[in-house]
Amino acid sequence: MASGTFGFGEEFAPYMDISCLGGISSKGLTLHPKAGNGGHRMWETPSGMLNSVGLQNPGVPHFIEHELPAMLGLGPAVLANLGGNTLEEYLEGACLLDATQVDFIELNISCPNVKHGGAAFGTKAAVAHEVVAAVRKATSKPLMVKLSPNAEDIVEMALACEAAGADCLSLINTLKGMAIDINRRKPVFRNVVAGLSGPAVRPIALRMVYDVCGAVKIPVVGLGGIASGRDVLEFIMAGATAVQVGTANFIRPDMSAVILEELSSLMDKLGIESLEEIRGAAH
């Protein structure tokens, strides 16, 4: 399950058998608690949604003490999605998580980096290399790096993260978008720009996963608008090792179970015995 769309997992237990999932990525965590953005936080679009949550979260120490024990008890692998505003925040957060039982650290490098003049860790490959290399040294946990589609060059970004020590990559995060309130004649979101996700971004995500899978040697986890078994097959054929489901969870809380059933049925129909058989077939 994709970060920010599945809480800490327990919230969805009443709706589906959580144990059928391979892993759950936590809400985006920062070293210190964040209240998130004010005003509108979500806005539905014709084929997806815009969000401007602002990384609201209780902070890494609270997560470790209060949320992680229950998350570990659910069964699926636990990915701690770690964001930060500075390199030091990333490092301190990674060190704290390194001492826990989380299975992966998913490094979210799409956050603003105030020490680089407002540039983002996730847009410039050299800056991404710097933070991934530093976190790599700070933890022995498997390190997944979540890439932003707003990177200047997604393949260059992926190669930089691989060279810096990432064990695997996940992509894509949300695309920049906006909406305007025609009654107020103003942007809907206080930050003007918000993150677009859902089926509208799927073709873009698929293209980026295809390109990255053709360039790197480490596993790639694809995400971006996946809402059916057919979508999963497309990403696997593009080369993805696994997929994450995100916005579809807001449509149906048990959507991942539905997708798994569709995937199994479709594989039977197409005579596919295992995903390994078709992984990267589109290249």
Image (cartoon, rainbow, N blue to C red):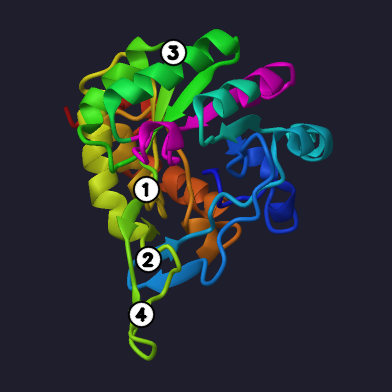
Q: Which residue bears the numbered disc 1?
A: 224
Residue 129 is a magenta residue: no
Q: Position of residue 203 (x, y in %)?
A: 24, 50
Under circle 1, the secondary element is loop
Tag 1 near tag 4, CB within 8 Å = no
Q: Amino acid at mark 4?
A: Lys
Between label 3 and label 1, give the one nearer the viewer: 3
Q: CA distance from mark 1 to mark 2?
A: 22 Å
Residue at 41% x, 75% y is 188
- Marker disc for residue 192: 2
Q: Which residue bears the numbered disc 4?
A: 186
Label 3 neighbourhood size at 10 Å, few (<14), some (14-19), many (20+)?
some
The vertical placement of 224 against 185, above or below, is: above
Q: Position of residue 97 (x, y in %)?
A: 68, 23
Give the camera-side residue of 200 and 92: 92
Give the camera-side residue of 65 and 243: 65
* Mark 1 or 4, nearer chain start: 4
Residue at 51% x, 49% y is 261
Q: CA distance from mark 2 to mark 3?
A: 33 Å
